[in-house]
Every structure is written in C-alpha cells, then in structure tokens.
Amino acid sequence: MALPESELPQWPRPRPAPALRPRILHPDFGEEREDDKIQQPDLRQHPLGQRPQATSLRPALLLLVLFSIGSYWSWMHPDVNHLAATQRAVFEEGQIWRLMSTLWVHADIAHLLANSGLFLIFGLFLRNYFGLWAFPGLSVLGGMLTGALALLTYGPETRLIGASGMVYFMAALWLFLFLRHADYLSWTHRVMRAIAFSLVVLVPTQFEPQVSYRTHAIGFALGLFFGWLSAPWMKPVTAPPSYASIHHEDVEYQLSPTDVEEDLLP
C-alpha cells in the first residue's frame, strides 16, 4: 500500500556542484583552504624553475655542426694541420685563430660524441637561463682562453684538439651561476647538488694517456673564475609567464588562460 510522504525513506540527495573558482596552488603538494596562506612561491615563477625552451638549443646545435664538419675534414686530411693549435703556431707564429678552430677538431667519432652530450646540455641551460652572453659568447671565449693556458704547459709542437676544455668551462660557469641564483633552494641543498653532479659527471672513472685532464682542470677553474666575475651583473633571464596571476584578499590564485576564459563566461 502507499505510504504517506512523511514516512517515505529520506535518501540523501546529491549535493549541488560547487561553483567553478580558481584553486590555490600549494608549493609542494595538495591544496589549501581559502584562509590558508602560501608560505613559498610557486617554483614556476622563478626563472631557474621554468622548463627550458627548445629554441634555446639552436646555438649549441649550430656549433656542434661546425665541430662535426671540422672533425670530418681533419679525418679526411690527417696529414694537414690547418685547424689544430700548437704552442709554436699560436704564440710564436701569431696564428691566434687556431684557438678557435682547434675546438672544432676531434680525434675520432668517440671523442666527438663524448663531448657532444654535455656540450648540448650546458649550451641549452646557459643560453636559456642567462642569455646569449653566457652562451655562446662567454663560453667560446672561455674555451679559447682555456686552450691558450693549456698550450703554455705543453711542448711547442704538442697538438691540443677538441672542445673538452670548453665543456668543462661551461659546466663550472653553470654550477657557479646556479649556486648564486637558485635562491628557491637552501644553500646546503645547492652545494650538495653541485658536488654530487661534479663527482658523478665531471670526475673521470678511468684515465687515458691521450686525454688532456690538465686542460679539463684549467677549463673548470676558469669557468668558476668567470662565473664569479660575471655573477653581479649576469642575472637569470625571466621568461614570459605561461599563466595569469590575480590577487584577492592577500591570497594569490594561479589561473591558466582556460580558467580565465571560463571565469568570464556568464
């Protein structure tokens, strides 16, 4: 039989969907209530916390093409010494341009590939986060100075080829600038990251007689020196924001362009 309405079971009714509103981003994880305040800024707002742009890789790729062409030409003409640098050619005969051209020459394909990985990585980071002056400007200059100082420590006819010294210069330059400007991390965290990276990537696990580790050390030391020299005026390049920011009652909301468009709909 039919029951009166007052005796019918009262099933829980579905709650209405909340109105769309911007959500507060927590710097680490989760969400906060409206009365909570964010203690740390969103890391995406820091220049060094943003993802590097693919277009910043172009200068490194262009130089790598020159390295490949110069290396291939030297492999095809092993008896001709038009590109490699020696102490006699540079300092006695005044062929300063060899400090540049010798960066293009590598002993073999393994030597070229060994330098290419770190060269592209640090070329991308320096160009993207610190601009064209950091790479290729200061990096190429540092590679030439590294070669010049290294040649002074060898005999007059010793050939010094390859971009290894330049790569170590770039690595040290990046590590110093990272230590100085990555202030979204504590100093302890920054130092531990730099030490761990240097030990894992830059310190060789085996020694080969044909490799100039002396040049690596000179390049790394020069990179630290030029990093210290240029740190006061070389600031991270601020990329344009990929999302809008609004402030409401001392609480910062982060909105994507889609959220902004949806919020304007009636």
Image: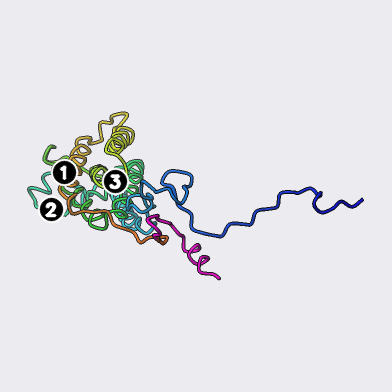
Image quadrant occupied by the C terminus: bottom right
Identify the residue shown where x is 32% and y is 45%. Answer: 184
Sequence order check: which comes first, mark 1 or mark 2? Answer: 2
Residue 259 in sight in this render: yes
Residue 259 on the magenta span:
yes
Sequence order check: which comes first, mark 2 or mark 3? Answer: 2
Residue 68 in sight in this render: no
Q: Could you give the CA–CA distance between mark 3 and mark 1, rounded to whole angstroms?
A: 19 Å
* SS at mark 2 in the image: loop
**In terms of depth relative to the viewer, which is nearer, 62 or 104?**
62
Q: Disc 1 vs disc 2: Cβ atoms closer than 8 Å?
A: no
Asked whether, in this view, residue 260 is left or right of residue 2, the answer is left
20 is higher (above) or lower (below) than 145: below
Q: How far across and down, in percent of the image, does residue 7 sit?
A: 81, 49
Asked whether, in this view, residue 122 is left or right of residue 51, the answer is left
- Circle 2 residue: 95
What is the magenta range? Answer: 247-266
Identify the residue shown where x is 30% and y is 32%. Answer: 199
User: Quadrant of residue 110 in the image?
Assistant: top left
Q: Could you give the CA–CA distance between mark 2 and mark 3, rounded to whole angstroms?
A: 41 Å
Instruction: In the rendered structure, find residue 225 and report the number of the disc placed on it.
Output: 1
Q: Could you give the CA–CA distance between mark 1 and mark 2, rounded to whole angstroms?
A: 26 Å
